[in-house]
Image (spheres, grey):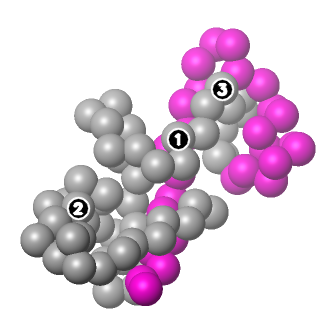
Amino acid sequence: MNITRLEPVFKDYIWGGNKLNEEYGKNSGLSVTAESWELACHKDGMCKVVDGEYAGMTLKILLQSVKKHCVLNSFLFLSN
């Protein structure tokens, strides 16, 4: 099984705070963090692969490139 680590997408909406950074160890780099999208394939935020042979690839591109193999192989996605 391949382990694929993803970089989460952070959102800094007005209702955000510091709890995700302070209590959950998220390193968003934002002054306020409202949301952390851990597994996102959305037009407003796309996770990227952190390491391995697919490093730097967006989740959308990764899924498009491996979809023919997904029936035979399992993918485990881990977020930072």
Residue at position x 78%, y 25% in the image: 17
Give the x, y percent position of residue 12.
Answer: 59, 27
The residue pinned by badge 1 equals 37
Height in image: 31 above or below 9?
Answer: above
Q: Position of residue 21 (x, y in %)?
A: 79, 44
Query: Marks 2 and 3: in contact by CB < 8 Å?
Result: no
Residue type highlighted by circle 3: Ala
Q: Look at the image and give the residue range highlighted in magenta.
A: 1-27
Distance of mark 1 from mark 3, alpha carbons?
A: 10 Å
In the rendered image, is residue 37 in sight?
yes
Is residue 26 rendered magenta in the image? yes
- Residue at the spot 81% in from the left edge and 48% down from the top edge: 24
Q: Nearer the viewer, mark 3 or mark 2?
A: 2
Give the residue pinned by disc 2.
Answer: 63
Q: Which residue is more in the foreground, 77 or 13?
A: 77
Whether pointer 1 and pointer 2 mark residues with C-beta atoms closer than 8 Å, the reply is no
Q: Quadrant of the C terminus?
A: bottom right
Above or below residue 77? Residue 28 is above
Asked which secondary structure carries label 3, the reply is loop
- Using the numbered discs, state the Cα–Cα distance from disc 3 to disc 2 in whole angstroms: 27 Å
Q: Give the farthest residue toward the front.
A: 72
Where in the figure is residue 22, as x and y percent of width and height?
87, 44
Q: Quadrant of the N terminus?
A: bottom left
**Mark 2 belongs to which amino acid?**
Leu
Quarter residue 16 falls in: top right
Q: Which mark is residue 2?
A: none
